[in-house]
Amino acid sequence: MVGPHEFVSVAVLVRKLTDGTELRGRVVETKAYLGGEDKASHSAGGKHMERNTTMFMKPGTIYIYHIYDIYLCMNISSQGEGAAVLLRSLEPLSGQDIMRGLRAAKRKVGAKILKEKELCNGPSKLCQTLDIQRSFDRRHLATDTEVAEGVESVARIGVESHSEWATKPLRFYLRGHPCVSVLNRDAERQMHSSTDLHNIEMERTV
């Protein structure tokens, strides 16, 4: 018999580099900030500034900020006004050699070789290891092609007779994954079109 406590939610963060290489890590530690009621949060007391605007955006939006004017931290906006989750540590799953090189570029010459468990065991180390940029702020995990495993949010299957609830986007799956039961081709084509347009606009600004 399997009880609810035996199900574990596992999130894998995927960073796709410009050459197509993917760096993957399993999220093993996070830290929650609960919004206005949380005195330790950037949004404590409902404080809403340019710096923390992302905390008030759609859940799943990437919030990047500096600490000590040097290091970056990566957060994800969540449910609740001004709430977010800080990604503190990852277990490296693939691309470890590249991760090690990215960390080495930020360390002193001659520093000891890092063990695999030391690559992403801290919020700023995580950002260095995945080459997370300040410019990723306000991008969304579900649609971003560089910082996430693509997630489709589409209508549910088998509830077609339930009026407006039949079309609400309440089924989620990894885009293009071979183990998904039913792919929504229309949603995936639309996402590819949006991504192509975004890439063209980025090229024009370079």
Image (tube, grey):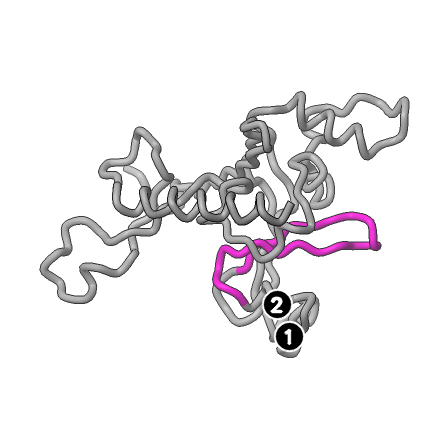
Relative to 114, say whether 202 is above or below. Answer: below
Q: Nearer the viewer, residue 61 or 7?
A: 61
Q: Does the magenta stretch include residue 19?
A: no
Residue 182 located left or right of residue 88: left
Badge 1: residue crowd in 10 Å (few <14, some 14–19, many ≥20): some
Residue 51 located left or right of residue 178: right
Q: Where is residue 84 in the image (x, y as percent from the top left)?
A: 58, 60
Q: Who's the residue at 67% across and 73% down the image?
A: 49
Task: Say which quadrant the C terminus sits in.
Answer: top right
Relative to 10, say whether 21 is above or below. Answer: above
**Residue identified by numbered label 2:** 53
Q: Give the prevailing secondary structure in the magenta stretch.
A: strand
Q: Which of 136 and 90 is in front in this view?
A: 136
Badge 2: residue crowd in 10 Å (few <14, some 14–19, many ≥20): some
Q: Which of marks 2 and 1 is nearer the N terminus?
A: 1
Q: Position of residue 11 (x, y in %)?
A: 48, 41
| Tag 2 secondary structure | helix
Task: Look at the image and give the residue range highlighted in magenta.
Answer: 57-77
Label disc, if present, on residue 48 of the rendered structure: 1
Q: Who's the residue at 65% across and 46% down the image?
A: 88
Q: Where is residue 86 in the image (x, y as percent from the top left)?
A: 62, 53
Q: Position of residue 22 (x, y in %)?
A: 55, 29
Q: What residue type is labelled 2?
A: Thr
In three-dimensional space, the C-alpha distance between marks 2 and 1, rounded to whole angstroms, equals: 6 Å
